[in-house]
Amino acid sequence: MRAVARRLSGVTIEHLPWQRVFDLYDVPETTFFCDPPYADGDQSIYDHAFAEVDHRALRERLRAVKGGWIATYGDHPLIRDLYADCRIEEVRRVRAINQAARREYVELIITP
Ligand SMILES: C[S@@+](CC[C@H](N)C(=O)[O-])C[C@H]1O[C@@H](n2cnc3c(N)ncnc32)[C@H](O)[C@@H]1O
């Protein structure tokens, strides 16, 4: 417990809609790490659906941030299209939530 307490000392954990997090923390010193629901994923695993309109809204918000940002996404044509003007690095990995199937998939690491 002591190690966890030490690690979390000075850390703030928020539970807010993503737009609110940007409103609260967008200053030039901030780097946002965004790991939104994937565009092709099973939306039923989330409390709230994240639809195409939400992916588009996040993309527009990222265009305007004062700080930096990194986004990770499963590979999907919509995401490739939305972030076509960004740097996109592909990483292949085994899907962690279904190790039994050992299905490899491509994760995109996107930066401005
Ligand atoms: C791909 S998961 C990220 C998992 C996280 N990075 C982790 O490693 O545990 C997407 C996350 O986005 C959250 N989410 C969905 N809709 C959201 C919204 N409107 N605002 C903020 N977070 C949202 C989901 O609850 C889920 O935790």
Image (cartoon, rainbow, N blue to C red):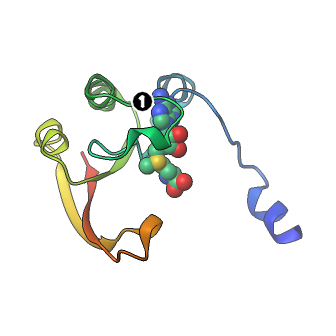
x and y percent of residue 21 in the render? 54, 29
Foreground residue, 49 or 1? 49
Above or below for 66 versus 29: above
Query: Disc 1 designates what residue?
Result: 49
Give the residue drawn at x 16%, y 36%: 82
Counting the numbered discs, the total is 1
Which quadrant would the C terminus be assigned to in this image? Answer: top left
Give the residue drawn at x 26%, y 28%: 52
Q: Residues within 10 Å of mark 1 (few under 14, many from 20)?
A: few
x and y percent of residue 81 in the render? 11, 39
Which quadrant would the N terminus be assigned to in this image? Answer: bottom right
- Which amino acid type is shown beneath numbered disc 1? Ala
Quarter of the image where one finds residue 93 = bottom left
Give the residue drawn at x 32%, y 28%: 51
Viewer can see residue 95: yes
Quarter of the image where one finds residue 14 = top right
Q: Does mark 1 have its CB less than 8 Å from ligand 1?
A: yes
**As drawn, is 72 to the left or to the right of 108?**
right
**As drawn, is 42 to the left or to the right of 107?**
right
Above or below for 99 versus 82: below
Foreground residue, 3 or 35? 35
